[in-house]
Amino acid sequence: MNRFLPAGFRRPNGVRWILATVLVVLLLVGLGAAAIAHFRSGNNVLANATQKPSTCADAYKLLALRPSQITAANSACFVQSLKFSGELAGAVAQAYAVGADSSGPTSACTEPKRWSAYPRVSMAMVIGAKAYRLRISPPGSSEHQTLKISNLANVLEVAAISEPSTDYSQVSGTVTLNPDGITGTIDATLLRDAAGAKPVHLTGQWACGAPLPAPSFDTAVPCSRFYALNHLGESDVARMKAQACNAQNLAFSGAISGHLDYAVTDRTYAAYPGLDGDNFCAAVGNQYDASLKFAVGDESFLLNLNPRSTRSIGPGPYLAGDTFGTNAALWLGRADPDHNGRFVTDSRVFWTGSSGSFTIASDMKSGTIDETFSGTASDTGSTVRITGSWRCAP
């Protein structure tokens, strides 16, 4: 047998042969493990890519939107921060406003005016590998305050767009609306009506529109929020700063919440009396008018103290709901920048004094108030309480 071996070759002894074989086996095992680890790493990359929060582009592709639809949907695509776990699992970073019965885009939500119904939310999004429609139907009308809904029957729903029968409509938890009425949060559990169905937990932030940008103003300048919110011209602002912005100390609670430090009574321009009058601060015979216009949050209001009497009005208290009916009114509206800031009242949204009273001080330009105002026929359940001290002239 040795004649077949190369010259000078010596057969290794048994121990050396076994060690060499073991080393070769270990090398092969190591290479195999590295290959498996690389394969698994590739799978993890794919898994991470799959778990990446979905965007509007994912929904466009999955729903096969036409280019013109994509263009329209881009203007109604809003940032979300939603997480689904359970029977539906995935994260959503963007969704677009979608029609109630189609996959095509629709108009974005707009901020509801006070006492107007909340918009119905319908957003298309991708969860996992399917497209779904998120529906939120808030009850009631906006008071421009945070609304927390705990009874979610007929309020919250998630349904597959291509399979409407896959409908998660048995819901518990909460949906919150921010004061703008078009953004909010969700923390809810959803279940579809099917044998063996498992619950879905949905949490995070939603949006069906873009809130209006807040006006920029200098908080150190009295009445500056009112000037900025109503886009008043430089000459009007200069005039009001000089002689129309008066210090107040008024607290609002109920449908309007906040503290008022300043209000405008521009007596040098277009004064007129009455419950919705503007720029007045004086007694005329047996009636008196003190009008204060101001901003709270992103809204402008006019408060008119308007007592009537069978004799001349003088200092003292004036009760709400006296024999002459309304003694004061609070209006939603705006200051018209094209007419020197004259206040334009909203004929649909206003409150009238229903209990309590206000006083007129001896200077006939100031006083105190502790009065509750009730909404009109448009929203009789809305109430605002105003307490503190007021002034309509220096």
Image (cartoon, rainbow, N blue to C red):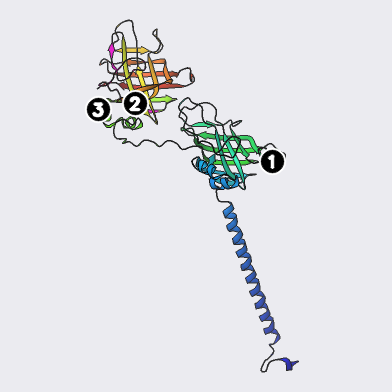
Measured in 3D between alpha carbons, the distance from the residue under mark 1 to the one under mark 2, in whole angstroms, is 57 Å
Q: Position of residue 268 (x, y in %)?
A: 25, 21
Q: Position of residue 117 (x, y in %)?
A: 51, 27
> Does residue 277 show up magenta in the picture?
yes
Q: Quadrant of residue 69?
A: top right
Q: Which mark is residue 336?
A: 2
> Does residue 152 show up magenta in the picture?
no
Residue nearest the viewer, comparing 164 with 105: 105
Amino acid on which disc 2 is placed? Asp
Q: Quadrant of residue 288?
A: top left
Q: Position of residue 219 (x, y in %)?
A: 32, 35
Point out the stretch of residues depicted in magenta. Answer: 258-284
Task: Reply above or below: 55 against 101.
Answer: below
Q: Is residue 375 left or right of 285 when viewed as pictured?
A: right
Measured in 3D between alpha carbons, the distance from the residue under mark 1 to the one under mark 3, in whole angstroms, is 68 Å
Q: Which mark is residue 239?
A: 3
